[in-house]
Amino acid sequence: MVRWLRSERWLPHHRIRVGARGERVAARYLRRQRLRIVARNVHVGRGEIDLVALDGETLVFVEVKSRTYREGIERTGWENLDRRKCDALRRSAWAYLRSLEWCPRGYRLDVVTVEFAGPGRFSGPTDVRWHPGAIEM
């Protein structure tokens, strides 16, 4: 029952759309930074990894935090990365590493924050920031 309540069914439709758009923007941004996206929305165990990429021979797990700009609110998405969320990301990353048939030279957990001008589908991203190694493995 609790798992069903935590599913996307209870998230406002706007939040789901903003998250999906943010992941697309983040993937495009990381490709421009010469990372190769190898997987999206990977479900591992109970968790999910937004993007998995290769930076040379380093395997990169990426958490994308997206939001729409609201007048007077100075938040970036970092506020939603509490200890519990970081622990869940680490567990998912370790589970993903254990499932691989090859051993990467290195690995890290990055965060990409994406801010949109507004909720409309034509409002583009106003700010994209990449934070390599933001979360300790």
Image (cartoon, grey):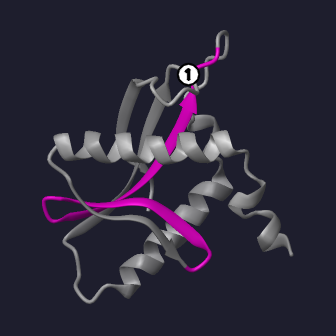
Reply above or below: 124 against 80.
above
Nearest the viewer among 132 and 18 is 18
Residue 24 pos. (x, y %)? 38, 46
Residue 57: give x, y in percent of width and height.
Answer: 15, 65
The magenta region covers 45-70
Taking the view exactly as shown, the residue that stands out farthest to the bottom is: 101
Which residue is rendered at x = 46% and y = 23% of the image?
A: 123
Q: Residue 92, relative to residue 116: is it above or below?
A: below
- Amino acid under disc 1: Gly
Mark 1: which secondary structure? loop
- For the N terminus, the quadrant is bottom right
Quadrant hosting residue 13: top right
Q: Residue at x 22, y 85 (%)?
A: 102
The residue sitting at 61% across, 48% down in the picture is: 16
From the image, tell me which residue sits under label 1: 118
**Residue 119 vs residue 111: left or right?**
right
- Quick one: which residue is furthest to the right in this view? 1
Give the left or right position of residue 62, taking residue 34 as reference: right
Task: Place residue 60 in its image quadrant.
Answer: bottom left
Count of numbered marks? 1
Asked if the stretch drawn in magenta spans residue 68, the answer is yes
Task: State the image coordinates of residue 118 (x, y, percent, origin top left).
Answer: 55, 22
Whether 45 is drawn above or below 78: the answer is below
The image shows residue 23 at horizontal and vertical percentages of 42, 47
In the foreground, 130 or 25:
25
Q: Quadrant of the C terminus?
A: bottom left
- Magenta highlight on residue 118: no
Q: Is residue 132 visible?
A: no
Badge 1: how crowded within 10 Å, few (<14), some, or many (20+)? some
